[in-house]
Amino acid sequence: MQRLAILSGGGALPAALAAAYPEALRIVFDDVPHQMPAPVEQHSLNRMGGLFDALRAGGASDLVLAGAMGRPALNPAEFDAGMMAIAPRLLPAMQSGDDGILRLMIAVFEEQGFCVRGAHELLPELTVPEGLFGGPVPTDAALADASRAFDILLALSPLDVGQGAVVSAGLCLGVETLQGTDAMLRFVGETPEALRRGRGVLVKAPKRGQDLRVDMPAIGPDTVRNAAAAGLEGIVVSAGRVLLLQADETRRALDETGLFLLGRVL
């Protein structure tokens, strides 16, 4: 790897990558909130040709797409020549799930000669390891709920819906959709007690066949606290395939809430 460029969305991951790779180019985008520390280069997603030129001018050979970007509004009136060349493929992909869009973006950057890296390749210590990371040992009932949630996510994978599900006493209380994990947990927390037979477990896992270089599932202290607010008893994730952000703070959140975090090999 010659020089890395970090294309930043929101959350703590881009800043963690910048700390580990201080010589990397730091790219942020108009209308995309970020926590990337200065110095940064500001770009528009409407002008991808300008971004490609800036990456080359900065000597970037490898790049990583890190953090949440959502689906920023695009303005065809502002497209440059580079974006115009991509648009016939990108605009139809915008009508599909996130995985389709991200696969296309990987292909576009590779066509431009860049090597797309995954955050887990650059910081392998950031993934949740196999075993109990923190909190109490999960009960057999919790493990059964986790297995059920994994089955649900596996079944939904071909539909490119989401990377999280909540199951309680065998009943699915929520599936992550475009709104994200926190929105799902808020919805679960609003479920009437009469419809719940137990506390429940949150499961996070990548979709089957997902390219982990982009949109790898992630959890952190906010996930733990939001799961606790939803009345859950713990979190189970696919070991080595889910990013763990702010590990020390996450462990403190587990201690505060009494939830467990378990990594399982699937």
Image: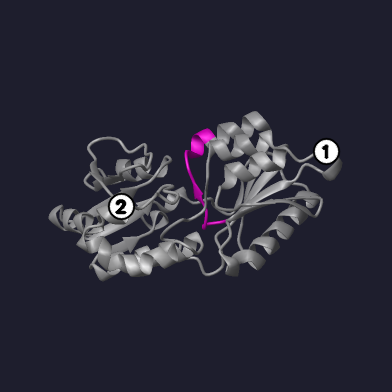
- The number of callouts visible is 2
The Cα–Cα distance between marks 1 and 2, rounded to whole angstroms, is 44 Å
Q: Which mark is residue 91?
A: none
Residue 182 in the figure: left or right of residue 142: left
Q: Which mark is residue 193?
A: 1
**Of the residues under marks 1 and 2, which one precedes in the sequence?**
2
Given residues 199 and 253, the one toward you in this image is: 199
Query: Element type at marker 1?
Result: helix
Give the answer, above or below, for where 125 lies relative to 112.
above
Three-letter code, disc 2: Leu
Q: Which mark is residue 45?
A: 2
Q: Which residues are magenta?
A: 239-249
State whether residue 133 appears in this view: no
Residue 186 counted in the magenta span? no
Residue 87 in the figure: left or right of residue 54: right
Point out residue 87 in the picture as x, y percentages from the top left corner.
Answer: 32, 65
- Report the residue at 75% width, 45% height from top: 200
